[in-house]
Amino acid sequence: MAMSPGVRRFVLVAHLSFSVGWIGAVLAYLGLGVAAQTSTDALTVRAAWIGMELVGWYVLVPLAVTSLVTGVVMALGTRWGLFRHYWVVFSFALTVFATAVLLLHMPTVSSTAEVAREADSTRLVALGGDLVHPGIGLVVLLVVLVLNLYKPRGLTGYGRRRVDERRAQPVVDS
Amino acid sequence: MPRWVKVSLIVGLALVLLFVVAKVAGVGGEHGPGRHGGGGGTPSSVLSEDAGHQPVDHRP
């Protein structure tokens, strides 16, 4: 199901925009998390948690899902395939993992943001920030980025079978 | 299987084991909406005395 060069380029632009945008959004979210963790000003902590909730649902989640979907489209529409090369399998698995953890973590963020809206100053400052999940998520996304840029060699068993099948097909003279 | 795949799988497995051990040992605390003091509802202890309105769900 190979895409035409024009369609492939369009999907690649979309995938790169969503994927790199996701990394940027995580960095922005981390900035808010650091602010919430380190600030002694109650209003800053409240604003940071409300900001984290909004960035999470309105930016991070859409970028994660679109990055995953366009990545699958790119894999299936090109010679790389989704399960032929180890770097694609690893990228896909890590992206699914990162997206799943994000979706499971956001209710906690919303809940804490709700607490932040209502809490008094003492409780607000004690809330702290959200650093572990976005920190680990950033590392995962950077690993995926490196895999996609370097594309380390290695065919899976399925990929090797596909190559052997293609080599076994007789060449037809026109 | 290339060496980088084997090393990555070993590292990944080690991290999963570390996470499981940490969860079993209770390191890291509660995992879920109650982690930062929220948890479905809003604990009365964190509300200021004159807060009189209902929490609003800002999720899309």
Image (cartoon, coloured by chain):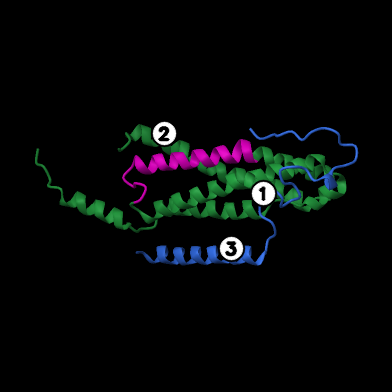
Chain colours: A green, B blue
Q: Secondary structure at mark 1?
A: helix
The spot of residue A145 in percent (x, y) is 49, 51
Could you classify mark 1 by the number of other residues whose Cα lies within 10 Å: few (under 14), some (14-19), or many (20 or more)? Answer: many
Residue hosting label 3: B19
Q: Amino acid at mark 3?
A: Phe
Label 2 resides on the chain identified as A
Q: CA distance from mark 2 to mark 3?
A: 39 Å
Residue hosting label 1: A30
Lower sequence index among marks 1 and 2 = 2
Q: Amino acid at mark 2?
A: Phe
Res B3 → quadrant: bottom left
Q: Secondary structure at mark 2?
A: helix
Which stretch appears magenta? A56-83
State the residue at coordinates (54%, 47%): A100
Could you classify mark 3 by the number of other residues whose Cα lies within 10 Å: few (under 14), some (14-19), or many (20 or more)? Answer: some
Q: CA distance from mark 1 to mark 2?
A: 30 Å
The spot of residue A160 in percent (x, y) is 27, 56
Of the pair A150 and A106, the residue shown nearer to us: A106
State the residue at coordinates (49%, 52%): A94
Label 1 resides on the chain identified as A
Q: Amino acid at mark 1?
A: Leu
Q: Which quarter shows the N terminus of chain A?
A: top left
Callouts 2 and 3 close, C-beta under 8 Å: no
Residue hosting label 2: A10
State the residue at coordinates (9%, 41%): A173
Res B4 → quadrant: bottom left
Q: Is residue A53 left or right of residue A4?
A: right
> Mark 2 or 3, which is nearer the eye?
3
